[in-house]
Image: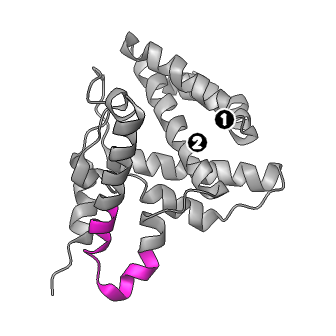
Amino acid sequence: MRYDFYAYMDRMKYIKRWQLMRSMRDENIMEHSHQVTMLTHALVAIHNQLFEEKADVTKAVLYAVYHEVSEVMTGDLPTPIKYYNRQIRGAYKELEHSACEKIVQTLPEELRGELEPYILAEEDCIEYDLVKAADRLAAYIKCLEELRCGNTEFAKAKKSIEKDLQNRKMPEIDYFFTHFIKSLSLSLDDLEGL
């Protein structure tokens, strides 16, 4: 019997992000998912170690790994379209859920129970909130990268995403901004102190 799950996962490298924006460097959802996973791990560590809270790191990181899975079937719908109004947002959310369910069906039945909870994530939990924050943080970092390369196309997106991150009122985000964001705007020579 043939199972197509990992063939679908491998196709994540072909799904381009930021389709309506002129980018200096293209980004795909596979590399984006990797970045979101690292940022999620960072936010969970900050959450657990500095604020003495307890988020499940495994759950959060696996949510992050699979947070864009639906896009191998739907593509990356540009943000202005996805959030144009409640009807479109609701319909797109249903479409994403259906795509995830379909992708889960491409696993052997004996493995579905192990992966399905992370592909069809529970949305009402701190782990999901941290992944969503990491996702926005990754978008903010993309804006910094583009601006560092002189691409002012991302200036408005940077401001909008920064405001969204501030409005979340998450101490983990504040800590990340205070201690890590500045370095993400530096060149390699600046990082090396040359």
The secondary structure that dominates the magenta segment is helix
Q: Nearer the viewer, mark 2 or mark 1?
A: 1
Point 24% across, 45% down: residue: 75
The circle drawn on residue 133 is 2
Q: Label 2 amino acid?
A: Ala
Residue 189: percent from left, percent from top: 52, 23
Q: Where does the N terminus fall, quadrant-wise?
A: bottom left
**Element type at marker 2?**
helix
Do residues under tags 2 and 1 come within 8 Å of each other at their CB atoms? yes
Q: Vertically, is 9 above or below 3?
A: above
Residue 125: percent from left, percent from top: 64, 58
Does the rendering let one see residue 112?
Answer: yes
Stretch in magenta: 100-115
Q: Label 1 amino acid?
A: Arg
The circle drawn on residue 168 is 1
Q: Is 13 included in the stretch rendered in magenta? A: no
Examine the image and state in which quarter residue 176 appears. top right
Work out whether residue 96 or residue 179 is closer to the camera in this orientation and state it: 96
* Lower position in the chain sequence, tag 2 or tag 1: 2
**How far, Cα to Cα, is label 2 from label 1?**
8 Å
Does the rendering let one see residue 186?
Answer: no
